[in-house]
Image (cartoon, rainbow, N blue to C red):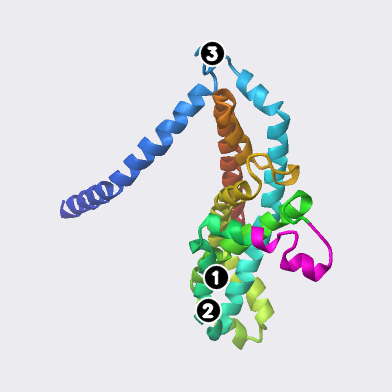
Amino acid sequence: MRLRKRFNCTWLSKGMFLLPGILGVLVFTLIPFLDVVKRSFYTSLSGEYCALDNYRRVLQNKAFRLALYNTARFMGVCLPLLLVSGLLLAVAMERHSFLEKWKVLYLLPMAMPAATIVLVWKLLFARQGLINGLLGAHIDFLQGENAFWVLVFTYVWRNLGYTLVLWLAALKAVPGEILEAARVDGAGEARCFFFITLPCLKGSCYTITVLSLLNAFKVFREAFLINGPYPSGEIYLLQYVFHNWYANLDFDKMAAGAVLSAAVTGSIAMLLKRLWDRREEDR
């Protein structure tokens, strides 16, 4: 009887502790999103039910398809670069303690305002700037294909410190006894890393990948401040489409596009989770 009362009190205290967060997510995230889903099936002006017409208009829109391709390309390049570079840097920092003293330097880009970063890029990549002077040619790094790689570098540079901290926390959770036993048995550092450390990082890798995926959408601020609402086709991302639709008050497309984007992002997260769970079951 006492155990039952204690169990009920524990769950009640946990429920009261989680209640404000649950209510916040419900009121500020879930309910508004459900309202957007509802609006995606109606016209914004007349309020008439239009079935899937809004979704057809979005999928047939050339700007949306271009932005979808560029966003997928951007994430396909950025995420592997960020995850691998962050992991390698975290491993080096864990093995060489003197590098950990400079860990704060990797977090400084996150503290810098987006407007400051844009100002630095504009000064650095000016036509008469330092790089063009060294190259002996006038190259516009803020337009065309060059702008895409500048945007990739900006994302990796700004998020590397955050990813590094997450990888360091994951590495510290790897059981040291297993590594020591492997080294005693004659395993080298490379075998210890690939056969012990990496398998232990699978759970953390899922979390870091999802967080990096979500942070990739925030790079729009730098791109918008540099190139305005209509940049070159190589860096025309989904955020530009929604910004321009909002400026034109095209709420029908915005609602349908938001639902499609959320569905794709959620599907990717669920697919990654499924792949990680399957690997854990195989082990």
- Residue 152 left/right relative to 254: right
- The amino acid marked with disc number 3 is Tyr
Q: Earlier in the sequence, mark 1 or mark 3?
A: 3
Image location (x, y in percent) of residue 272 = 60, 50
Where disc 1 sits, the SS reads helix
Q: Say which residue label 1 marks.
A: 106
Q: Magenta segment, which residues?
A: 122-139
Residue at the image point whose x is 45% and y is 27% from the top: 35
Give me the C-alpha separation between circle 3 and circle 2: 58 Å
Image point (32%, 40%), residue name: 23
Callout 1–callout 2 Cβ contact below 8 Å: yes
Q: Amino acid at mark 2?
A: Trp
- Please name which of the two marks, 1 or 3, marks the residue nearer to the observer: 1
- Position of residue 191 measured from the top left corner of the image (x, y, whole percent): 68, 77
Q: What whole-number distance in Å separates the C-alpha atoms at marks 1 and 2?
A: 8 Å
Amino acid at pointer 1: Tyr
Q: Is residue 8 above or below residue 173?
A: above
Q: Nearer the viewer, residue 233 or 279?
A: 233
Q: Inspect this view and state whether residue 255 appears.
A: yes
In this figure, which residue is indicated by the disc labeled 3? 49
Q: Residue at x 73, y 68 (%)?
A: 130
Count of numbered labels shown in the rendering: 3
Left or right of 42, for residue 35 = left
Crowding at dot 2, Cα within 10 Å, few <14 / some 14-19 / many 20+, comes out as few
Question: Mark 2 = which residue?
Answer: 102
Q: Please tell me whether residue 196 is drawn above or below residue 68 in the rendered image.
A: below
- Which quarter of the image is occupied by the C terminus? bottom right
Marked residue nearer the N-terminal end (3 or 2): 3
* Residue extending farthest left: 2
Whether residue 267 is in magenta: the answer is: no
Foreground of the two, 83 or 57? 57
